[in-house]
Amino acid sequence: MKIKIFSFLLALGMVFAMGCSGGAAGDAQVPSVFKVDSIVSTNGQNNVESDMVNADDGISADYVTVTVSNFLKNPGATPSHFNDVTISGYNVTFSRSDGGTVFSNFDGGLSQSVTVNSTATFNVMVVRLEEKTSGALAGTLSPYEMTAKITFSGKNGSGQFVSAVGSIEVTIANYGNDVGPLAPAIGSFFADKTEGIDGQDVALTWYVTGDVNELILNPGDIHLSPVGYYPYGTYTIHNVDFPQEFTLVAMGIFGVTSTNVSVDETAVAPVVPTINTFSAQPTTISNGQSATLSWDVSNATSVTIYPGIGTVAGTSGEMTVSPQFSTTYTLIASNGDGVKTATADLTVSNSEPQITLFTGSTDSVDANDVAHLYWTIQGNYTKAELFPYYSAVNDIINVTNQNSIVTEAIQVDTTFVLTAYGDSTIVNKTFKIKINTTTKNQVKVLDSAAVPGTLSWQVENPAVATIRYNLYTVDGDRLVFSKAAGQVEDGNGTISTDYKVLSKGCGYSVIQLVAVDKEGHAVNHYSLIQGNELCKRQSSLALDSDKPVIFRAIPGHAQASDFSINFPADMVGGTVMLKAVSGERDIQMKDAGGRWVPLYNGELIPVDSTRVNVAIRDDYRTNLSNEVALLIWGQGKDGQPTGRVVTLRLR
């Protein structure tokens, strides 16, 4: 589907072709006017719609149709062959009013005669194929405008130089709408076991394709950048309560997709496959050479190798491979009890670079916000550069041996260009981030009155048609839900589900609700349920303010934030536990000795007054999530528990 949104700009330039003598009939001095009458695209439009991405049919150079004329200035004069014009070449230059990145200027050859008192129509190339495959704007998806000025030059019949100038707008984009291959897709998602014993870890493994800028694992609202987890990734969830369903969400600017895998509960440890060997020989080859993959697996019913191989016959064997780039091969062995994986690295020593992924955490930000850029460069390269580093300044930053960066504050629509330099090849890829001009719809979730044995929330967002949601147990004693996913029609309604507490003690369960609108915007909401109604007391813990605790720091540099918890008098002399139950694993708290201790496994602190000040920081060793749910679980002198869950914003 073509995008027709741009104006036509045609600048006409003219040069008079003058003869050499007195002006009589047929005299070479009788002046004529050589000019450009029109420049249009080959489909007759007033704008060249240059398709930069076409996964179906491939991309090609773009041409324009030019009409020029050559008429005597005085219609009553007698023409001669001295007034004829021969065009021998043309020059194309590109410009933008805001000074942004444009195509490279170039010269083209041409042999076109234009006899006096006539017009001529012909085609010339205006966008070269190499600009789409390896130029500074190669792969651009969003509309991007520039002006192409075309200067035609040649001589008239008396040998005098003549030229004429015309202009046309060029808009580059993904006109073929070939977003199918760019939309996120999950090829596989599995756990390393089909049944588990409470307290065991679960290793989740996946294979994703398409333009993915974020991966989310639930339960836990674990956000992962593509770097290190694309297209193949593995993440281990610790201390799992079974049965448990895990969800992988792959998000990108061209869509969102998700899939689930369930692990049941068992009292007997499962018998999973054993991978005895998996290797590549030799481990290093030159481009065009081959290596041999070999494997030996026990107790498996299926063996699959990624990338590019798929399911193989037998639990042992070997295969010849000739990858273009250095490749990590992953072997997946499975049976009815679970899955095991292993990897084998094969280095290709002299391959030219290719940028296989260049994306961002978002394609739109509010003014002065920042974004994360991620990329993967395959092959061998000597230098990589990112332009611009500052959104309002044309600075270039060297990003060799990096695969991500946090931008400076973005103030205007910015197209970032990533360039990799090989021995004989320079490759580029772009990613555009726009400034938001409208406020996005937000999902609002409000707690409703608690009903014993029933968990419910009131969802409000009248701006969208449908909200989908999922419920997860993210920490504490296990719950069984009668319904753990569904839809709220017309953006409003009550999510209600029955639950049964499997613990007989005075434990707790932290429940996470993930509600997503049709545009993919999500909100996570956490609630705390105590395990036994007989020992449940009304939570009397309170923060110093209802405002969220926000951590602000430069990535890679931790910075603490303080907040206070107010306790009732009967809690003094007891203890309280602070525990990060969702999100990042490097949330830390400063203990009484001034040391920073992790909160992933919880930290007990004494309640020696009705007001306790807590210093918390994000160590920024990992960047998984923009928030963390902090469980505040207290116990009074009488041993009765109370608690609440607080959502902390990290960035």
Image (spheres, rainbow, N blue to C red):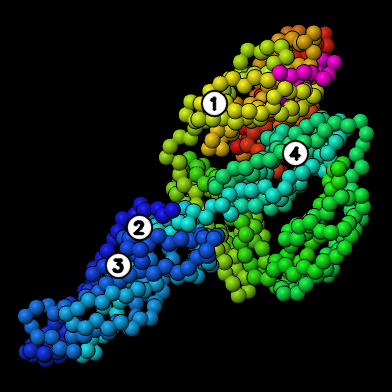
Front position among marks 2 and 4:
4
Q: Is disc 1 surrounded by few (<14), some (14 to 19) or many (20+) residues within 10 Å?
A: some
Res 241 label = none
As measured in the structure, the alpha-carbon distance from the residue carrying label 2 to the one carrying label 4 is 52 Å
As measured in the structure, the alpha-carbon distance from the residue carrying label 1 to the one carrying label 4 is 26 Å
Res 261 label = 4
Residue 3: x %, y % from top left: 40, 53
Q: Is residue 58 left or right of residue 306?
A: left
> Please, what is the three-letter code of the amino acid marked with disc 1?
Glu
Residue linked to disc 3: 39
Q: Secondary structure at mark 1?
A: strand
Q: Tell me the quadrant of the picture where the C terminus can be found.
A: top right
**Residue 178 to residue 589: above or below:** below
Q: Which residues are magenta?
A: 498-512
Q: Nearer the viewer, residue 220 or 604?
A: 220
Residue 253: x %, y % from top left: 54, 46
Q: Are marks 1 and 3 in contact (CB under 8 Å)?
A: no
Residue linked to disc 2: 97
Q: Is residue 104 left or right of residue 458?
A: left
Q: Residue at x 87, y 41 (%)?
A: 337
Sequence-wise first label, 1 or 4 = 4
Sequence-wise first label, 3 or 2 = 3
Q: Is disc 2 surrounded by few (<14), some (14 to 19) or many (20+) residues within 10 Å?
A: few
Front position among marks 3 and 4:
4
Q: Secondary structure at mark 2?
A: loop
Front position among marks 1 and 2:
1
Residue 267 falls within the magenta-colored stretch:
no
Q: Residue at x 92, y 52 (%)?
A: 298
Residue 161: x %, y % from top left: 25, 84
> Please, what is the three-letter code of the amino acid marked with disc 4?
Val
